[in-house]
Image (cartoon, coloured by chain):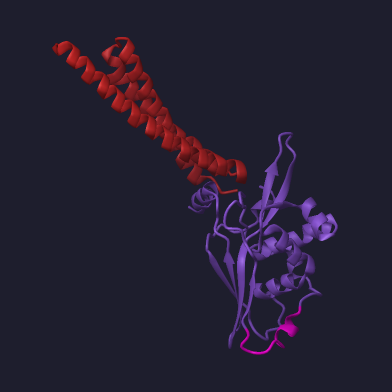
Amino acid sequence: MESNCSAGGRRNAHENRANPRDRRHNIHRVPLVTVVIIEFQSRTNGVHTKNRYAGLEAATHQRYVSESNRDDGEERPRSDELFAQLDDEYARRILVETTGGTRSAKELSDACNASLSTIYRRAERLIDCGLLAEQTIVEEEGNHYSVYEARLDSLTVDLDEDGFSVTIEEKPTDSLSDRLTDMWEGL
Amino acid sequence: MTASNATSTLSFDYLTLLSVTLIAIGLSLFIVFQAYRGYRHHESRRMLFLALGLFLLTIVPFSLAVVVDSLAQVATLEPRVTSYYLPLFSRLSEVSGLGCLLYSLLIDAE
């Protein structure tokens, strides 16, 4: 199928490129024993959306543990990628815009005052991180386009001796047919 | 006297059976519709065959039973219809439904 079926664990080649926005070293300057909670307000009802979740696992809580002070660069821990995403102004903006319901790339482009390609690039990375869900809308004439919706309700960063760990609390899947699909495809 | 009693019992039986079957059809339609929506939204072939399988497994036999029962109310049917043809076609539909479910499980999730 097409891009809306990206598996959660997919690691694209471009993910491994050197990311100029990676502020890993700044993160370690945060005062110790800090707990940062970023809450994205979510509407509990009326969100009539069909999420294509990046991963099939229906876990409500996912925990990504970063490896602290490791700089081998071989495999970037997912939490670092998450921090990099949250450092990005457009990525944050996309999440804010899509937390109340689905938005198309065009709408996001207008709302964020960014080019379409910027939106697509940010969206792709957010999807790979599991923060954003993509869904393909097929129109009558056979055209199709993607709409996006934020997957996370809240995101908690905890610090202990092992490093930072990020917990993503996902929105509950609201549609029965989505849950049925997830269940059946998970068999 | 006994004849009219028998008819009223018969039609009561028929109505009970009809309403229960209609409830079953309604519930099945709901579930099949959810599976079909899953197919439409996610373009998942597995969901399409799940929907088709559930449809053949539930709605088709139920509807056949209702139709045959209703026909039996207004016309006299050959006994062979209810004793042989109805079960045969119901079973055939269920077999194909199970085949669809199995196929849905075996194909790769896209």
Q: Position of residue B56 (x, y in %)?
A: 44, 32
Q: Does residue A177 appear anywhere in the picture?
A: yes
Q: Is residue A17 left or right of residue B74?
A: right
Magenta span: chief secondary structure: loop
**Which residue is painted at 53% across and 43% down in the image?**
B47
Q: Is residue A29 magenta?
A: yes
Q: Position of residue B80 (x, y in %)?
A: 28, 15
Which range is magenta?
A23-34
**Which residue is painted at 85% across and 57% down in the image?**
A115
Q: Is residue B106 magenta?
A: no
**Which residue is painted at 66% across and 50% down in the image?**
A135
Q: Is residue A10 above or below residue B69?
A: below
Q: Colour of chain A?
A: purple
**Which residue is painted at 43% across and 34% down in the image?**
B26
Q: Does residue B43 appear anywhere in the picture?
A: no
Given residues B107 and A109, the one toward you in this image is A109
Q: Position of residue B23 (x, y in %)?
A: 38, 33
Q: Is residue B84 left or right of residue A166?
A: left
**Residue lying furthest left:** B2
Q: Is residue A104 left or right of residue B9?
A: right
Chain for colour red: B
Q: Is residue A109 above or below residue B70?
A: below
Q: Position of residue A172 (x, y in %)?
A: 54, 59
